[in-house]
Amino acid sequence: MKDCVLIEGLTIITTIGVYEWEKTIKQKLILDIEMDWNNQPAATSDNVDFCLDYAKVTAAIESYVQNHRFELIERVAEEVAQLIIHQFFVPRVKIKVSKPGAIPAAKNVAVMIERYK
Ligand SMILES: Nc1nc2c(c(=O)[nH]1)N=C([C@H](O)[C@@H](O)CO)CN2
């Protein structure tokens, strides 16, 4: 099995939606992210410089998503995947973006993508 770093259940409030009424409010998205990363150098050195720092990745995602407007959750997933690949040199990322309030009759709706460098 390949090594990964995970960020699970990351809640972000932003402007998201295709309808006019959605462009005037903020809604909740939840991101689940899996990033390929060789964790052995960090494990053997016990040095944060060698890890994929989930705190730095989280801060970059929060800043990006909170400060942009989106129509589709597909767009959020794609832009976050590209940010992670290019800013943090991650070779593969899998992202699920959930919009739990979107369909009252459904517990959740989401998209999931996987992207490679
Ligand atoms: N596949 C998607 N379908 C829909 C989206 C979306 O982002 N991806 N968005 C909407 C509306 O914004 C909806 O969330 C309002 O309830 C509809 N379908």
Image (tube, grey):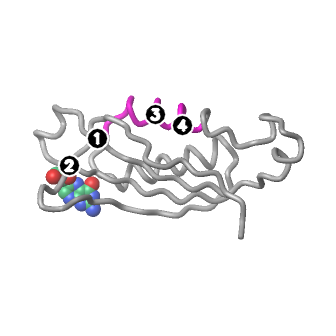
Q: Is residue 86 left or right of residue 82?
A: right
Task: Please state the extent of the stretch shown in magenta in the rendering.
Answer: 57-69
Check mark 2 vs ligand 1: CB closer than 8 Å? yes or no: yes
Residue annotated with mark 1 = 28
- Are the residues flagged by discs 3 and 2 in contact, CB closer than 8 Å? no
Task: Determine the secondary structure under disc 3.
Answer: helix
Which amino acid type is shown beneath numbered disc 4? Thr
Specify the label residue 11 is tagged with.
Answer: none
Residue underneath mark 3: 62
Give how far apart the Cα atoms at labels 1 and 4 are.
16 Å
Do the CB atoms of the residues marked 2 and 1 lie less than 8 Å apart? Answer: yes
Which residue is pictured at 83% across the width and 53% down the height? 40
Local packing at callout 3 (Cα closer than 10 Å; few below 14, some 14-19, many 20+) is: some
Q: From what the image shows, is residue 41 above or below residue 116? A: above
Residue that label 2 marks: 101
Residue 10: quarter of image: top left
Query: What separation in Å lies between label 2 and label 1 (alpha carbons)?
Result: 7 Å
The percent position of residue 3, horizontal first and vertical second, equals 72, 60
Q: Is residue 96 magenta?
A: no
Badge 1 or badge 4: first in the primary sequence: 1
**Whole-number angstrom distance, CA of label 1 to CA of label 3:** 12 Å
Residue 57: x and y in percent read 59, 38
- Confirm or deny contact between disc 4 and disc 3 (CB under 8 A): yes
Residue that label 4 marks: 58
